[in-house]
Amino acid sequence: MKRNQPVRIEAASRPAGGEAAGYTDRLSKALSGGGPVPNPLVCFVVGTGRCNSRCLYCPAWDHPAGDIDAPMLCRALREFAQMGGRVVGISGGEPTLCGGMAEIIRTCAETGLYSIIVTNGAFDAVDRLEELLDAGLNAIEVSVDTLDPVKYKRIRGIEMDGVMKTLAALEKWRNEGRVWGLLTSTLSAANAPDILPLLDYARARSWQMTWHPLKLVRGIEDRIMELWPSEDVIREIENNLSLVIESDPDDVLLYADKTLLRHAGDALRSRRLRLSPCMAGWTEVDIALSGDVRACCSMPPVGNLRKAGLREIWNSRRMGLARAMTKRGLCPGCWYSGQITEAMFWQRRMGLDVEDCIRGLPKRG
């Protein structure tokens, strides 16, 4: 396959001509009950349950699972593209460990879908990522909470050497115009002072950066509470994020929704935070390792790809009920661990006036 050309985010993801305005109009009518729901634009996928890191805040490594069924997912992604989908974000576990990942990325490339992988970059990730770049991968998002090796090992449970090799390779690939480079970080008591240094590191390499707050996960609460910030640390996080937002008036540094970033501290204070109505099940869809399809990862499945196609599930009564829950503020309520920030980022990149669509919906406190 031909190597990637220099990345043009807007060209890869933005609807052409007046398509964005048309989509916004259809979405607004659907939200008001006056028309069918338009196609999903963003698809989030869990590629594997396996992981080679030992993060304190993640259950993947001590509750390992297998890989997603790649042929099943590829069929769904082809259907997603036919429906008008634009962006596929793949996480895990560690998605580069998935045996069928090159096939999945190749399917995205062949169908015109913009593909992003979230990786820890650990150990020999560079070789695996190189293979995925050759398959057509568009963007690499490295999850790194600090550049301090001592802090990193405390949070992630492994040495940082492999990650630094991946970051060096990402810089090279970005300079060659082969990939869009991103960093993502989980906010906790262990890395509040690292927010600005990480941003400076990304800025120097023409990468973009996002953060999401620590969240409780059932079964590993005690482990996560080791990293839970005090009120003083939450205020430090808020102050540093305010500086981050102020430093990016032209929206070139942040791969995140600024409104949500401003509420990161609130998400750490209130574990059931509700902000403005989200678009889970309206503009994006979530595919789990098992093939379960959800409006978002915090909600029950509405169908399974082993039993039905993505289009059928998207238009199903059960997905309609899930949409009604998010519309009325009856979903579990969360900051959505980064996926909402990414979805809203893409909505704006596509020229969608989502705020106008949701203006009349119930507010969340």
Image (spheres, rainbow, N blue to C red):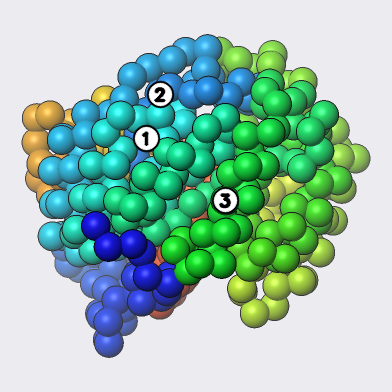
- Residue 237 placement (x, y as % from top left): 80, 48
The N terminus - image quarter: bottom left
Check residue 169 in the rendering and tell me which mark sits there, or answer none.
3
- As measured in the structure, the alpha-carbon distance from the residue carrying label 2 to the one carrying label 3 is 25 Å
Residue at 51% from the left image edge and 41% from the top image edge: 126
Q: Which of marks 3 and 1 precedes in the sequence? A: 1
Residue at mark 1: 46
Residues 169 and 239: in front is 169
Q: Quadrant of residue 186?
A: top right
Q: Residue furthest right?
A: 232
Going by the numbered disc 2, the residue's amino acid type is Gly
Q: CA distance from mark 1 to mark 2?
A: 8 Å
* Tag 1: amino acid: Val
The answer, for residue 364, to whether it is visible in the render is no
Going from the N terminus, do you reach mark 2 or mark 3 first?
Answer: 2
Helix, strand or loop under label 2: loop
Count of numbered marks: 3
Instruction: Say which residue appears at 79% left-offset and 33% top-offset.
Output: 149
- Name the kind of residue labelled 3 in the image: Ala
Query: Do callouts 2 and 3 mark residues in contact (Cβ within 8 Å)?
Result: no
- Compared to 131, does 354 lie above or below? below
The residue that mark 2 highlights is: 49
Q: Which sits in the foreground, 14 or 18?
A: 14
